[in-house]
Image (tube, rainbow, N blue to C red):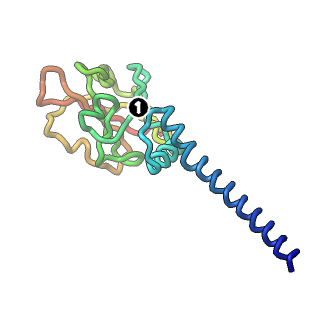
Amino acid sequence: MKRFKRKERKIYKKRNRLIVIIIILFVITQIIFPLSICYSKKIKYNYKTFIVQNDYKKYEFNWKIKIPKINLDAQINDGTDDENLNKYVAHFDESAYIKGNICLAAHNRGYDVNYFGRIKELEDGDEIIYEYKQMKLKYKVTQNKIIKDTDIDVIDNTDENLITLITCVENQPEYRRCVRGILNI
């Protein structure tokens, strides 16, 4: 009977050691390691934030517009608020991402980033390259015209695959420059 109890105690001791080791590994991998990464990158630690940041990096993608004729290569971001327009080419929330009318806006002068500063130089047939996730779509310019700032129907979705670029017109606040391209198949 004593022999059986000694074996039983040894088993409990081994099991307890294993549980302690598992707890230590959990603490290191789930708390200490993320904290050290946050500290090194000067990020305020939040377990959910850490997971979201790591997941975001996995799914990060390129969203760009390139126009070779005017040496434009710029990142696109959702929303046409001032914060986006001051950093990126802005995507109109209500417009298409792939099929339909993709509508983009950017500054052309007077700001730190003036991505559409030279779009008035675009002519029929010039190439616009739009990259979204793993897709690369090429458009050819079909229109470069000035419209009233109230002509918002240019950003309406269409059955036709278009790209629409909009910017201000210098010294004419009631007008916008609108460049349109059609998908080049």
Q: Position of residue 162 (x, y in %)?
A: 36, 41
| Quadrant containing the N terminus in the rendered view | bottom right
Q: Secondary structure at mark 1?
A: strand
Of 88 and 50, the residue lying toward us:
50
Q: Position of residue 182 (x, y in %)?
A: 38, 38
Residue at (67, 57) in percent of width and height:
20
**Quarter assignment of residue 178:** top left
> Residue most toward the front?
2
Of 54 and 173, the residue lying toward us:
54
Q: Position of residue 77 (x, y in %)?
A: 36, 38
Amino acid type of the residue that numbered disc 1 sits on in the rendered structure: Gln
Q: Which residue is mark 1?
A: 75
| In the image, residue 15 above or below residue 142 | below
Horizontal placement of 45 versus 180: left or right?
A: right
Horizontal placement of 183 versus 144: left or right?
A: right
> Residue most toward the bottom?
1
Question: How many discs appear?
Answer: 1
Q: Residues within 10 Å of mark 1 (few under 14, many from 20)?
A: some
Q: Position of residue 145 (x, y in %)?
A: 23, 29
**Quarter assignment of residue 153:** top left
Residue at (60, 47) in percent of width and height:
28
Of 64 and 123, the residue lying toward us:
64
| In the image, residue 122 above or below residue 165 | above
Residue at (43, 37) in percent of width and height:
43
